[in-house]
Amino acid sequence: MSASAGSLRSDRPRGRWVGRLFYGFLLFSLVLGFATLGALLVQVFLEGYKWVDLVLFLEPPSADPLIAGAEPAILATIFLGVLLILFTVPLGVGTAIYLEEYADRERWYNRLLEVNIQNLAAVPSIVYGILGLAFLVRGIGLGRVLLAGAMILTLLVLPTVIIAAREAIRAVPDSIRQGAYALGATKWQVVWRQVLPAATPGIATGSILATSRGLGETAPLLLVGALTYVSFNPTLLGEFTALPVQIYQWVSRPQEEFRTLAAAAIIVLLGILLTLNATAIWIRNRYERRW
Amino acid sequence: MSATMAAVSVDLTARARELPAKEFREVVFHVEDLGVSYNGNAALQDVSLEIYRNFVTAFIGPSGCGKSTFIRCFNHLNGLIPGAVVEGKILYHGEDLYGPHVDPVEVRKRIGMVFQKPNPFPKSIYDNVAFGPRVLGMTDRLDDRVERALEQAALWDEVKDRLKASALSLSGGQQQRLCIARCLAVEPEVILMDEPASALDPIATTRIEDLMHELKRDYTIIVVTHNMQQAARVADMTAFFSITRGEEGQRTGILVEYDATSKIFTQPSDKRTEDYVTGRFG
Amino acid sequence: MSPADSASVKGLRVSFQEELEALQANLQEESEFVLRSLRGAINALQQRDVELADEVIAFDDEVDDRYLAIGQGIEQLLARQTPVAVDLRLVLAVLHINLGLERMADLCVTIAKLTKLTAELEHDATLIEAFEEMGSRAEEMIRVAMTSFAERDLVGAESLVDLDELIDRANRRFVKHVLELGNDPELREWGTRMIIVSRCLERIGDHAVDIGEQTAYLVTGEFREFTDASHPDQ
């Protein structure tokens, strides 16, 4: 009697049901997560969209909700974003290059560095705030200024940028390096002319995503001195506020209108972050390499 | 002698393919008692031979016999692997490649390499070929250099209208020829090829082999191949490597026989060579 | 296919192509030498010229040199280029033809030696003339065989059978006439030796037919005898 004789119908109906159950569970998790998030977003949007207007963008805050705007906060957030990128990219990429291309893995200090970068990425943001307060605001006497806020956010975001840059550099195949060395390039030439250009899309994506995370942080900014009521536009060494802080401030006001304003500000903040993330994704898709 | 029987001596073209006698060969590399070990494990030992100018020399042998390790000694690429130690001598035109103060960059300027899997840079075709000259400061008449290199690599006609296109848009065989052009652009004396055709289809392989025949007029070529028939087709001299086992079972590569290819494939001196080329032993 | 593509396809394995062509050129040259040998042997025979016969014998060294060189060339080609399909058939055909040509040259040497041996003997002038006809026929067959091979001409190759038939008939006639020569012992000795010469010429014809069979093998891929000695009517 040959093994192939007999019906082709499955003889394990129970197995199929387990499969279906599992699939159902997956769908359920997906829907639960997205539905919750979706509900929150929709609620915020419905509450605040009417108040997203020029007043919001061009007027400073005020006690009167009808003429209150978030111009200083919006500008400060944008300002912080620019500074973040300016600080984190050279520092993060430089560290990543050192670790990937130059460091001898056997040395103890390099291994220490490796372990700690992972740890740093997991430290709660408020700890960075305390750090900033102690060393930047008071320690070196910078004061409660925008620059200090930028510097502390840099520290917060740096580990993530380093990790992302390392991944991008590691993704460059070794065959490219070997090919470049075989042509007579020095180590520096190999890194600067081959590795970095090839890793740039990954580095850019990682930096933008890390920055957008940093822009949403409230606690460290508060500790470093973001004021809750600022009616003038920010300067580098002046007092400042930021969108998350402004939102927090408005939400704690008793008037109903301020809560609506807060919702509007949230929409703006989300808009900034979404734009940043979309840019990161666009860069990644456009420059995706198939080795 | 009567007119009928006057013998006319004719140059038998087949005979002209015989290699020039030893006295007429110019030595490019003199290898003496070379050994390579990785982290204390000997991968290759006691290799001595000479590489001749404008010859194609092939290294054949089973996997793990050290032929790739050996070829990488010629351009200092073993130095990139941590834990690799090279003993013995390789004299390049009389100068020890592993002497003190030898700059790997200078070595690689004169001794280029093509790899098994084509590895074009993720740049344009032009920038790929121009990379070598640029990093070495040979930037005068760059367009001419690029064109000449691509012509020598038999690729110019296929790409001359799209030099700005990405190198990754080329087929596998074209990419490998691009890598050869890249290597030629810095005007080396020697070209090392580590299994250059093993990742390519048969027609692309034949193109590369034909290219080797042409290039050897101007360059000295060393090729590692696991395909014996390829060595038989392209090489003037063939070196057969095999594996010996030490007392504790460690495997080390050694040179078994080095001779004219015609001899290796018709009447090898060593039985191990014969076993390998007849396919009775892998 | 663009012009660049077709040019490059034709140009693959150039050195291998050149080796094959060199081999065939050497073979053609060897056949020229054989023709020279044959003409020399026939002339020496007809003119009873012992010095010419010596030259023919010495000339065989040239043919042997070519024979060895071609043999080595075939060995190298098989070892290094691993030819297949039509290339393989070509190399095998060259191998056989090389052998055949060398045999033909040896047969010419035999004729020359017999010329020397019978130089002082009584002879029959009319019978000697028959050799001119047989010799010319053999020369023609060698030329047709080598040309058909060069041009891969199957019809030309097959025509060799009919040409061979003529030599065979001439050989049979010759033997008949020798048997009618009479009782003179010198003449009889001469006649016996000349039968061998006639036989040599007939063998040369057979070898030429073999060359034709190699051409057929090259073109069709089939081993085939044009006529089988054991089945003459097929």
Image: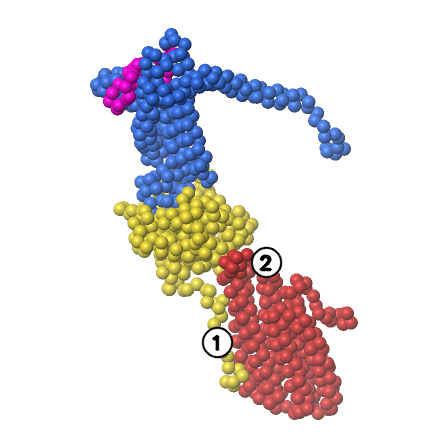
Chain colours: A blue, B yellow, C red
Residue placed under numbered mark 1 in the picture: B9
Name the spot of residue C88 as percent of width and height, x first: 59, 61
C225 to A246, vertically: above or below: below
Residue placed under numbered mark 2 in the picture: C84
Q: Residues within 10 Å of mark 2 (few under 14, many from 20)?
A: few
> What predominant SS class does the magenta segment belong to?
loop
Question: Which of the chains bears the disc numbered 1?
Answer: B
- Depth check: give the residue in front, C40 or B182: B182
Q: In the image, C115: left or right of B239?
A: right
- Depth check: give the residue in front, A25 or B47: A25
Question: Which of the chains bears the disc numbered 2?
Answer: C
A287 to A268, vertically: above or below: below
Check the image and name the residue furthest to the left.
Answer: A141
How many numbered callouts?
2
- Examine the image and state in which quarter residue A201 appears: top left
Q: CA distance from mark 1 to mark 2?
A: 32 Å
Check the image and name the residue furthest to the right.
Answer: C233
Q: In the image, B60: left or right of C219?
A: left
Q: Which residues are magenta?
A: A224-252
Element under label 2?
loop
Check the image and name the residue furthest to the top.
Answer: A254
Q: Residues within 10 Å of mark 1 (few under 14, many from 20)?
A: few
Q: Nearer the viewer, mark 1 or mark 2?
A: 2
Name the spot of residue B41 as percent of width and height, x first: 40, 39
* Viewer can see residue A128: no
Indicate the amino acid at tag 2: Val
- Depth check: give the residue in front, C118 or C27: C27
